[in-house]
Amino acid sequence: MPPTSDAEMTATAEEPVLVEPFRHNRWANLKLLDACAQLEPARLFADAPGTFGSIYHTLMHIVRAEEWYNFLFTGQWLAGQMSSGAPPTPAELRARAARSGERLIELARTAQPAQRVRWQEDEGEVSLTSVELLTQAIQHATEHRTHITTTLSRQGIEHPRINEWAYLCERRGAAAPRAFHLFAQ
């Protein structure tokens, strides 16, 4: 899905450097969700050795984690906590991913480096800086998108190109240098 405005697609000198990776993160999540929404159920619920689980459950895990990261920053669930008893449809999952991705972009824009995020675990309080949690959010989604593309490849399904080069090609359109297209492959 291409950006809808210049403001959405162009980083500015005033913007924190973490904003652009979160734009890519949102784009890659949505691109992968759109591709996977076209799969027949048997393929959507397939998994591959060494991956997190089925494609669907991994997509749900990515979105659930991003909603949790948002919750840790704000203390509020964007769309109510996702229920295990009534898993969302692919369309509902996409809508949740779009919302949480937008909010993570805003958090990357506004979070202060010294800001701390805290929560309770059985062994006590856990505390991270905003930068540490935002870094985890990017790494987590990237790792699990790789699990999904691996599972798709193992099924003989060509997956969408979701690396940064592909993102830049889509953003820049015809103005993207030829090298970007080569690197995207």
Image: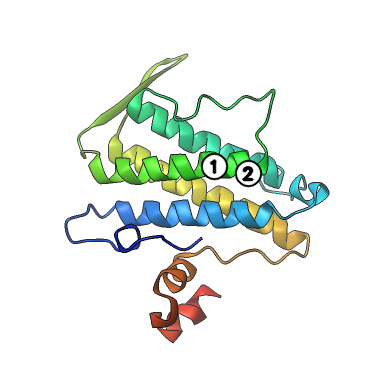
- Give the labeled residue for mark 2: 91
Give me the residue at 51% from left, 56% from top. 28
Q: Residue at x 72, y 55 (%)?
A: 38
Residue 161 rendering spot, x and y as whole percentages: 57, 67
Q: Which of the image's four quarters has the C terminus?
A: bottom right
Q: Secondary structure at mark 2?
A: helix
Residue 122 position, x and y percent, is 47, 14
Query: In the image, what residue type sits under mark 1?
Result: Ala
The crowding category of the residue bearing disc 1, from other C-alpha atoms within 10 Å (few below 14, some 14 to 19, many at least 20), is some
Is 156 situated above or below 118? below
User: On the rendered structure, is 78 left or right of 39?
Assistant: left
On the rendered structure, is 143 left or right of 17? Answer: right
The answer to which of 100 and 18 lies nearer the viewer is 100
The furthest residue to the left: 14
- Which residue does the image show at 23% across and 32% down from the upper left? 115
Percent coordinates x, y for residue 167 in the rendering: 46, 66
Q: Position of residue 164 (x, y in %)?
A: 44, 65
Separation of disc 1 and disc 2 at Cα?
6 Å
Label of residue 95 in the image: 1
Helix, strand or loop for disc 1: helix
* Contact check, label 1 and label 2, Cβ < 8 Å: yes
Picture quarter containing residue 32? bottom right
- Which residue of the protein is positioned furthest toward the front in this rendering? 4
**Which amino acid type is marked by label 2?**
Ala
Q: Quadrant of residue 155?
A: bottom right
Q: Report the residue that reaches farthest toward the right.
A: 42
- Say which of 134 and 107 sits in front: 107
